[in-house]
Amino acid sequence: MKKKIALILSLCLMVLGLTACGEDPTKVDYNGYSYDQLKEQVQSTAQGLLAMSDDQIEQYKSNENEQYKMLADMVTRWDDATEDVGKYQKLGDFTITKSGKTLTCEQEIVFKERSVILTFVFTYYNMELDDVTVDPVQTLGEKMANAGLNTLMGMGVVFTVLILISLIIYGFKIFPYLEQKKKKNEKAIVSATDENVQEIPAVTATDDLELVAVIAAAIAASTGTSTDDFVVRSIKRRF
Protein backbone atom coordinates (compact mmCIF):
# COMPACT_ATOMS: atom_id res chain seq x y z
CA MET A 1 0.00 0.00 0.00
CA LYS A 2 2.77 2.42 0.91
CA LYS A 3 4.55 1.67 -2.35
CA LYS A 4 1.40 2.46 -4.33
CA ILE A 5 0.95 5.79 -2.52
CA ALA A 6 4.60 6.70 -3.15
CA LEU A 7 4.19 5.81 -6.84
CA ILE A 8 1.05 7.98 -7.16
CA LEU A 9 2.78 10.93 -5.50
CA SER A 10 5.76 10.56 -7.84
CA LEU A 11 3.47 10.58 -10.87
CA CYS A 12 1.71 13.71 -9.57
CA LEU A 13 5.01 15.50 -9.12
CA MET A 14 6.08 14.54 -12.66
CA VAL A 15 2.81 15.88 -14.08
CA LEU A 16 3.21 19.15 -12.19
CA GLY A 17 6.77 19.47 -13.43
CA LEU A 18 5.76 18.90 -17.03
CA THR A 19 2.95 21.45 -16.62
CA ALA A 20 5.39 24.07 -15.34
CA CYS A 21 7.84 23.36 -18.18
CA GLY A 22 5.05 23.74 -20.72
CA GLU A 23 3.88 27.14 -19.43
CA ASP A 24 2.93 29.54 -22.20
CA PRO A 25 5.57 32.32 -22.31
CA THR A 26 3.06 34.75 -23.81
CA LYS A 27 1.00 34.68 -20.59
CA VAL A 28 3.85 35.00 -18.09
CA ASP A 29 4.42 38.20 -16.10
CA TYR A 30 8.06 39.22 -16.46
CA ASN A 31 8.49 41.38 -13.38
CA GLY A 32 5.76 43.82 -14.42
CA TYR A 33 6.23 43.44 -18.19
CA SER A 34 4.12 41.28 -20.45
CA TYR A 35 5.29 39.21 -23.39
CA ASP A 36 3.71 41.63 -25.86
CA GLN A 37 5.35 44.68 -24.26
CA LEU A 38 8.82 43.17 -24.47
CA LYS A 39 8.19 41.95 -28.01
CA GLU A 40 7.02 45.41 -29.10
CA GLN A 41 10.09 47.05 -27.54
CA VAL A 42 12.54 44.73 -29.31
CA GLN A 43 10.73 44.80 -32.65
CA SER A 44 10.47 48.59 -32.57
CA THR A 45 14.23 48.77 -32.11
CA ALA A 46 14.69 46.36 -35.02
CA GLN A 47 12.44 48.46 -37.26
CA GLY A 48 14.38 51.58 -36.26
CA LEU A 49 17.69 49.97 -37.15
CA LEU A 50 16.32 48.78 -40.49
CA ALA A 51 15.13 52.31 -41.33
CA MET A 52 18.50 53.97 -40.60
CA SER A 53 20.49 55.33 -43.53
CA ASP A 54 24.23 54.90 -43.94
CA ASP A 55 24.83 58.51 -42.90
CA GLN A 56 22.80 58.06 -39.74
CA ILE A 57 24.69 54.87 -38.91
CA GLU A 58 28.04 56.65 -39.28
CA GLN A 59 26.77 59.52 -37.15
CA TYR A 60 25.79 57.18 -34.32
CA LYS A 61 29.04 55.23 -34.60
CA SER A 62 31.12 58.40 -34.27
CA ASN A 63 29.17 59.62 -31.22
CA GLU A 64 31.55 59.61 -28.23
CA ASN A 65 29.04 60.81 -25.66
CA GLU A 66 29.09 58.40 -22.71
CA GLN A 67 25.34 58.81 -22.25
CA TYR A 68 24.72 57.22 -25.67
CA LYS A 69 27.46 54.59 -25.49
CA MET A 70 25.06 51.62 -25.50
CA LEU A 71 23.20 53.07 -28.49
CA ALA A 72 26.48 53.67 -30.37
CA ASP A 73 27.64 50.12 -29.60
CA MET A 74 24.31 48.68 -30.78
CA VAL A 75 24.48 50.57 -34.08
CA THR A 76 28.11 49.51 -34.59
CA ARG A 77 27.22 45.86 -33.99
CA TRP A 78 24.24 46.18 -36.32
CA ASP A 79 26.41 47.62 -39.08
CA ASP A 80 28.97 44.82 -38.69
CA ALA A 81 26.39 42.01 -38.49
CA THR A 82 24.29 43.15 -41.47
CA GLU A 83 27.20 43.40 -43.87
CA ASP A 84 26.62 41.16 -46.92
CA VAL A 85 23.35 39.68 -45.60
CA GLY A 86 21.31 40.70 -48.60
CA LYS A 87 17.91 42.36 -48.75
CA TYR A 88 15.60 42.50 -45.73
CA GLN A 89 12.77 39.94 -45.86
CA LYS A 90 10.78 39.93 -42.60
CA LEU A 91 10.84 39.70 -38.81
CA GLY A 92 11.16 36.11 -37.68
CA ASP A 93 10.57 34.38 -34.37
CA PHE A 94 10.64 36.20 -31.02
CA THR A 95 11.71 34.29 -27.91
CA ILE A 96 12.10 35.12 -24.20
CA THR A 97 14.44 33.17 -21.93
CA LYS A 98 14.80 33.65 -18.18
CA SER A 99 17.99 32.30 -16.64
CA GLY A 100 18.70 33.15 -13.00
CA LYS A 101 18.88 36.93 -12.63
CA THR A 102 18.93 37.55 -16.39
CA LEU A 103 16.07 37.90 -18.88
CA THR A 104 16.99 37.57 -22.57
CA CYS A 105 14.77 38.63 -25.48
CA GLU A 106 15.79 37.48 -28.97
CA GLN A 107 14.31 38.68 -32.24
CA GLU A 108 15.20 36.99 -35.51
CA ILE A 109 15.50 39.36 -38.48
CA VAL A 110 15.40 37.51 -41.79
CA PHE A 111 17.50 38.72 -44.72
CA LYS A 112 17.96 37.14 -48.12
CA GLU A 113 21.43 35.66 -47.51
CA ARG A 114 21.28 34.98 -43.77
CA SER A 115 19.30 35.92 -40.68
CA VAL A 116 20.43 38.19 -37.84
CA ILE A 117 19.53 37.86 -34.14
CA LEU A 118 18.85 41.07 -32.17
CA THR A 119 19.23 40.31 -28.44
CA PHE A 120 18.17 42.42 -25.45
CA VAL A 121 19.64 41.41 -22.08
CA PHE A 122 17.79 42.62 -18.96
CA THR A 123 18.56 42.38 -15.25
CA TYR A 124 15.41 40.62 -14.10
CA TYR A 125 14.90 42.11 -10.63
CA ASN A 126 14.68 45.71 -11.94
CA MET A 127 14.24 45.05 -15.70
CA GLU A 128 17.14 47.37 -16.50
CA LEU A 129 18.62 46.94 -19.96
CA ASP A 130 22.21 45.68 -19.58
CA ASP A 131 23.28 45.04 -23.15
CA VAL A 132 22.13 44.79 -26.76
CA THR A 133 23.86 42.44 -29.17
CA VAL A 134 23.44 41.77 -32.89
CA ASP A 135 24.79 38.48 -34.22
CA PRO A 136 24.52 36.89 -37.67
CA VAL A 137 23.11 33.37 -37.72
CA GLN A 138 25.76 30.91 -38.79
CA THR A 139 25.06 28.29 -41.40
CA LEU A 140 25.57 24.60 -40.65
CA GLY A 141 28.81 24.61 -42.62
CA GLU A 142 30.14 27.58 -40.64
CA LYS A 143 29.20 25.91 -37.37
CA MET A 144 30.98 22.73 -38.41
CA ALA A 145 34.05 24.70 -39.48
CA ASN A 146 34.17 26.58 -36.17
CA ALA A 147 33.72 23.33 -34.25
CA GLY A 148 36.57 21.74 -36.21
CA LEU A 149 38.79 24.77 -35.63
CA ASN A 150 38.06 24.71 -31.91
CA THR A 151 38.85 20.99 -31.82
CA LEU A 152 42.17 21.51 -33.60
CA MET A 153 43.10 24.38 -31.27
CA GLY A 154 42.26 22.26 -28.23
CA MET A 155 44.30 19.35 -29.52
CA GLY A 156 47.19 21.68 -30.33
CA VAL A 157 47.18 23.09 -26.81
CA VAL A 158 47.09 19.58 -25.30
CA PHE A 159 49.99 18.32 -27.44
CA THR A 160 52.01 21.47 -26.72
CA VAL A 161 51.59 20.95 -22.97
CA LEU A 162 52.54 17.27 -23.31
CA ILE A 163 55.69 18.19 -25.23
CA LEU A 164 56.66 20.74 -22.58
CA ILE A 165 56.12 18.17 -19.82
CA SER A 166 58.25 15.63 -21.74
CA LEU A 167 61.06 18.19 -22.13
CA ILE A 168 60.94 18.99 -18.42
CA ILE A 169 61.11 15.28 -17.49
CA TYR A 170 64.01 14.77 -19.93
CA GLY A 171 65.73 17.79 -18.37
CA PHE A 172 65.79 16.05 -14.99
CA LYS A 173 67.99 13.38 -16.59
CA ILE A 174 70.39 15.90 -18.13
CA PHE A 175 70.89 18.08 -15.06
CA PRO A 176 72.81 15.44 -13.02
CA TYR A 177 75.08 14.76 -16.02
CA LEU A 178 75.83 18.48 -16.43
CA GLU A 179 76.51 18.79 -12.71
CA GLN A 180 78.97 15.86 -12.77
CA LYS A 181 80.69 17.33 -15.82
CA LYS A 182 81.01 20.67 -14.05
CA LYS A 183 82.58 18.99 -11.00
CA LYS A 184 85.06 17.12 -13.23
CA ASN A 185 86.07 20.40 -14.92
CA GLU A 186 86.59 22.02 -11.52
CA LYS A 187 88.78 19.12 -10.38
CA ALA A 188 90.82 19.31 -13.59
CA ILE A 189 91.39 23.05 -13.07
CA VAL A 190 92.49 22.49 -9.47
CA SER A 191 94.91 19.72 -10.53
CA ALA A 192 96.43 21.88 -13.26
CA THR A 193 96.92 24.71 -10.75
CA ASP A 194 98.69 22.40 -8.31
CA GLU A 195 101.03 21.17 -11.04
CA ASN A 196 101.92 24.73 -12.06
CA VAL A 197 102.69 25.60 -8.46
CA GLN A 198 104.93 22.56 -8.12
CA GLU A 199 106.83 23.43 -11.32
CA ILE A 200 107.94 26.85 -9.99
CA PRO A 201 111.67 26.47 -9.12
CA ALA A 202 112.31 26.95 -5.40
CA VAL A 203 115.21 29.04 -4.21
CA THR A 204 117.23 26.58 -2.17
CA ALA A 205 119.53 27.29 0.74
CA THR A 206 122.45 25.98 -1.32
CA ASP A 207 122.04 28.77 -3.89
CA ASP A 208 122.02 31.35 -1.09
CA LEU A 209 125.29 29.97 0.37
CA GLU A 210 127.01 30.04 -2.99
CA LEU A 211 125.87 33.61 -3.51
CA VAL A 212 127.18 34.61 -0.08
CA ALA A 213 130.58 33.00 -0.79
CA VAL A 214 130.93 34.81 -4.12
CA ILE A 215 130.03 38.19 -2.59
CA ALA A 216 132.37 37.64 0.38
CA ALA A 217 135.28 36.70 -1.89
CA ALA A 218 134.74 39.78 -4.02
CA ILE A 219 134.70 42.06 -0.98
CA ALA A 220 137.80 40.39 0.52
CA ALA A 221 139.68 40.77 -2.76
CA SER A 222 138.87 44.45 -3.02
CA THR A 223 139.64 45.30 0.62
CA GLY A 224 142.55 42.91 1.14
CA THR A 225 140.94 41.34 4.20
CA SER A 226 139.94 37.82 5.16
CA THR A 227 136.42 36.47 4.77
CA ASP A 228 136.51 35.08 8.31
CA ASP A 229 135.58 38.48 9.74
CA PHE A 230 132.45 38.85 7.57
CA VAL A 231 128.99 38.30 9.06
CA VAL A 232 125.98 38.20 6.68
CA ARG A 233 122.92 39.68 8.32
CA SER A 234 120.40 39.32 5.44
CA ILE A 235 120.12 38.97 1.70
CA LYS A 236 117.62 41.02 -0.29
CA ARG A 237 116.95 40.12 -3.91
CA ARG A 238 116.32 42.94 -6.38
CA PHE A 239 114.77 40.76 -9.08
Image (spheres, grey):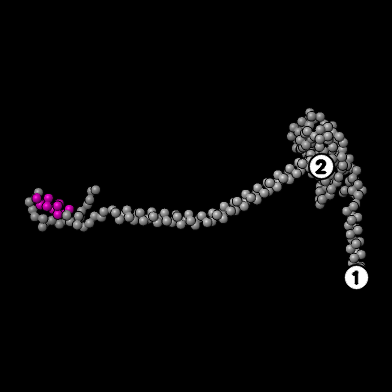
For residue 212: magenta? yes
Identify the residue position indicated by label 1 in the image.
2
The residue positioned 9% from the left and 49% from the top of the image is 222
Residue 76 percent across, percent down from the top left: 76, 35
Please state the extent of the stretch shown in magenta in the rendering: 211-221
Left or right: residue 25 compared with residue 231: right
Going from the N terminus, do you reach mark 1 or mark 2 first? Answer: 1
Residue 34 image position (x, y, % from top left): 90, 46
Q: Amino acid at mark 2?
A: Thr
* Tag 2 residue: 119
Look at 81% across and 29% down and name the residue there. 53
Among the 4 quarters of the image, the one containing residue 205: bottom left
Local crowd at mark 2 within 10 Å, few (<14), some, or many (≥20)?
many
Residue nearer the viewer, 149 or 73: 149
Separation (CA) of disc 1 from disc 2: 51 Å
Q: Can the viewer see residue 167?
A: yes
Tell me the quarter of the image containing the N terminus: bottom right
For the image shown, how many numbered marks are present on the structure? 2
Q: Amino acid at mark 1?
A: Lys
Where in the figure is residue 153, as x and y percent of width and height? 68, 46
Q: Quadrant of residue 119?
A: top right
Q: Are marks 1 and 2 in contact (CB under 8 Å)?
A: no
117 in the magenta segment: no
